[in-house]
Amino acid sequence: EPEVTQTPSHQVTQMGQEVILRCVPISNHLYFYWYRQILGQKVEFLVSFYNNEISEKSEIFDDQFSVERPDGSNFTLKIRSTKLEDSAMYFCASSANLAGGISYNEQFFGPGTRLTVL
Amino acid sequence: EDQVTQSPEALRLQEGESSSLNCSYTVSGLRGLFWYRQDPGKGPEFLFTLYSAGEEKEKERLKATLTKKESFLHITAPKPEDSATYLCAARHKGGGADGLTFGKGTHLIIQP
């Protein structure tokens, strides 16, 4: 069964450093998303991406964040200068397999990258 | 502002003891109500999508229902392996690229 994969599973960084979180969405999916979940809190939407551009972003997704689809398979989230409050689990998700077999609207999540900012 | 509220926050049941989890939403122009299961340290696992009031979907011991203001996840004769956090999420616009608004989840523990 196809699945979303994310690397690394755990990233430790110093405050002020740049980090790049990587995701490989489900093949043939068209929409890609990043969410975060601070420990003990709810899952929060960050950004959606379609047709090589940002479709929607939340208030959390400020100028420190950027997303990119550098090739046909990877989808990345970059945090330019990490802060202590960026420590969270970051989930990538994808949806809309127009090849059929999977409903258009369901978002399928990866296992997450735990980001720890020291 | 779109909101999704889940109750109870935590629920402890005996194996075989059926119950229901609640998700109430205030979303303008609902375009899908989603249920996910999340195990500790893992990503949300998709369970159901509901689109219109009166709709029901089932999967093994789980059944999800939807009204105009809330959704229920009914768990029938649960087993210990059903222990997890169950998340409800709503999508408020049309189109595939819109983010989901999640509730805080219900932490379900099934005791053998």
Image (spheres, helix red, strand yellow):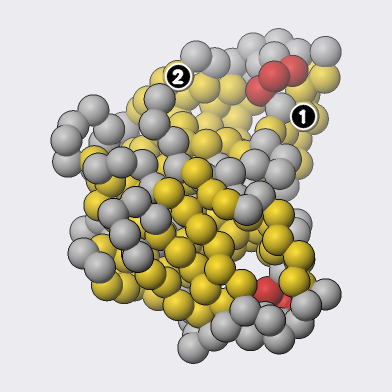
Residue B38 position, x and y percent, is: 62, 39
Q: Quadrant of the C terminus of chain B?
A: top right
Subunit that carries the residue with mark 2: B
Query: Does label 2 or label 1 sit earlier along the sequence?
Result: 2
**Residue drawn at point x = 59 percent, y = 16 percent:** B76
**Looking at the rendering, which quadrant does residue A51 occupy?**
bottom left
Residue type, mark 1 in image: Ile
Q: Are marks 2 and 1 on the same chain?
A: yes
- Image height of B68 relative to A61, above or below: above
Subunit that carries the residue with mark 1: B
Q: Is residue A106 visible?
A: no
- Image height of B69 relative to A90, above or below: above
**Looking at the rendering, which quadrant does residue B2 occupy?**
bottom left
User: Which residue, given by chain and number where applicable, does mark 2 sit on?
Assistant: B59
User: Which residue, given by chain and number where applicable, does mark 1 sit on?
Assistant: B109
Residue type, mark 2 in image: Lys
